[in-house]
Amino acid sequence: MGGFHEPNEQERDIALHWLTLENRGSLLFPFVCSIVVIVGAMTFVILAFFDKVMAPIAVLMSVFAILAVFVSIKHVLTEGEKIEKVKRGEVLVADPRIMEVGYKSYGRYVHYNIVKADFRDGEGVKSLTFVISKRIKNQVEKDRKGMILKFPDSRNKRLKKNYVFIPRSMENVIAED
């Protein structure tokens, strides 16, 4: 379990591969949610023309629609910035000790695939639980190897405090797609 270091070419290729693969799947959800909220807000706006009681609800839905679009755009830009930083090599990589790979339930209908990993950050050892996709979980269960990415010099506050867990190998990934 080592601390953060500059990635070599192979580590950058692996990180770029996994971030690009996960980026495709993670952008569809905010886009669909934004479309649903916009359609709902437009429906309420149209109904507000016929019934004045619906006008406050239409205004509230319009505000939510605008916020949903801004959150989606921020998410897309953050994911794009991660990929660009990996391409330029402005990322740090740590080798974690994987403590647990599993499945966590937070309620009846809320389930997450998780990885608990220990890694050295600065002087101390941090232990974090990462929510991961099923594709990453399957790869980590096979190899029990991974990398943690840290984006140190970012103006984006969400990205600066973010650690990203990815598998260390690219075996059997192309066959799963």
Image (spheres, rainbow, N blue to C red):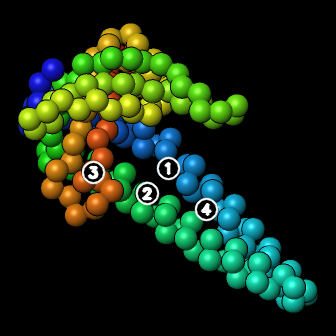
Between discs 2 and 3, the one toward the N terminus: 2
Between discs 1 and 2, the one toward the N terminus: 1
Residue 87 coordinates in the image, percent (x, y): 20, 45
Left or right, residue 54 beside residue 149: right
Kindly state the secondary structure of the residue where label 4 is placed: helix
Question: Circle 4 is placed at which residue position?
Answer: 34
Question: Circle 1 is placed at which residue position?
Answer: 27
Identify the residue at horizontal 36%, vertical 40% (top origin).
Answer: 20
Residue 39 found in image quarter: bottom right
Question: Circle 3 is placed at which residue position?
Answer: 161
When the figure is inspected, residue 96 is found, relative to residue 55, above or below; the finding is above
Mark 1–mark 2 Cα distance, whole angstroms, equals: 8 Å
Q: Nearer the viewer, residue 108 or 72?
A: 108
State the quadrant of the N terminus. top left
Mark 2–mark 3 Cα distance, whole angstroms, equals: 15 Å
Q: Pointers 1 and 2 in contact (CB under 8 A)?
A: yes
Amino acid type at mark 3: Lys
